[in-house]
Image (cartoon, rainbow, N blue to C red):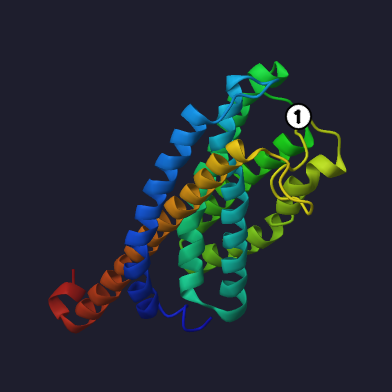
Amino acid sequence: MSRLANPNRFQKLSRRVLPWAAGLAGLCLLAGLGLGLFFSPGDYQQGESVRIMYVHVPAAWMALGVYTLIALASGLFLVWKYPLADIVARAAAPLGAGFTLLTLVTGSLWGKPTWGTWWVWDARLTSVLILFFLYLGYIALQNAFDDGARGAKSAAVLALIGFVNVPIIKWSVEWWHTLHQPASVIRLDGPSIHVSMLAPLLLMAAGFAAFFTALLLIRVRSALLARKIRALRLVQAAADPHIRGR
């Protein structure tokens, strides 16, 4: 873990992974959208509106997965003081918020023709909305203090406390009566969804994951570069009395 937390090693690894992640994202998203829009069948109850699933479900998986990554990185930052862990969590937060917003929007678009309403305050929808506010709260706390270290610690604590919402979202359908159907892909007895729908769904999920990975690497690399530039400017200012006096 300490090897991966080294910024220089991370930069070298990210340079190798980034083009592969970007290429995989493009291929999977194109293939998934093509299969989902033109080759997968409509649902016998929901009709053509079921195709929203190919964006809504992977976005929901990513919303939960990214928050889990933020909570894990926050724990590493608080316990082992890895600066890179805080940078990763900070870079991932806006991306996770975007996936969560996409989940809420596509869920509303899907809910109107399926349930006859844009929104209901059931357990699944409410807990996903809370997740969106947790993302916004994390981002706000990171920038709420003049002392960056204090903001990072406060945001990390919030991320860990808010992680309790992730299993609530996952199991809300089983714990309470909601409009959402139970899990049809990740099941102990195997997926209950037909392969003609499962294939584009998994391709879209892989595409979303690769797309997130590529964006995360770009954001972390940019943050590390900005950090290095600030450090060099401080060293230059300390060495040059003219700069120090400005």
Point out residue 140 in the picture as x, y percentages from the top left corner.
53, 50
- Tell me the SS state at disc 1: loop
Residue at left offset 73%, top offset 46%: 169
Pick whichever, 137 or 211, lies toward us.
211
Pick whichever, 62 or 136, lies toward us.
62
Q: How many marks?
A: 1
Residue 46 image-quadrant placement: top right
Q: Please state which amino acid type lies under the numbered disc 1.
A: Trp
Residue 51 vs 182, above or below: the answer is above
Point out residue 20 in the picture as x, y percentages from the top left corner.
36, 60
Pick whichever, 46 or 216, lies toward us.
46
Can residue 118 be seen here? The reply is: no
Residue 98 vs 217, above or below: the answer is above
Residue at left offset 80%, top offset 40%: 173
Residue at left offset 86%, top offset 34%: 177
Residue 57 image-quadrant placement: top right
Name the image quarter holding the C terminus: bottom left
Point out residue 148 in the picture as x, y percentages from the top left corner.
47, 65
Point out residue 133 in the picture as x, y percentages from the top left corner.
62, 43
Residue 42 image-quadrant placement: top right
Tag 1 residue = 121
Q: Residues within 10 Å of mark 1 (few under 14, many from 20)?
A: few
Can residue 218 be seen here? The reply is: yes
Pick whichever, 142 or 246, lies toward us.
142
Question: Is 204 placed left or right of 12 in the picture?
Answer: right
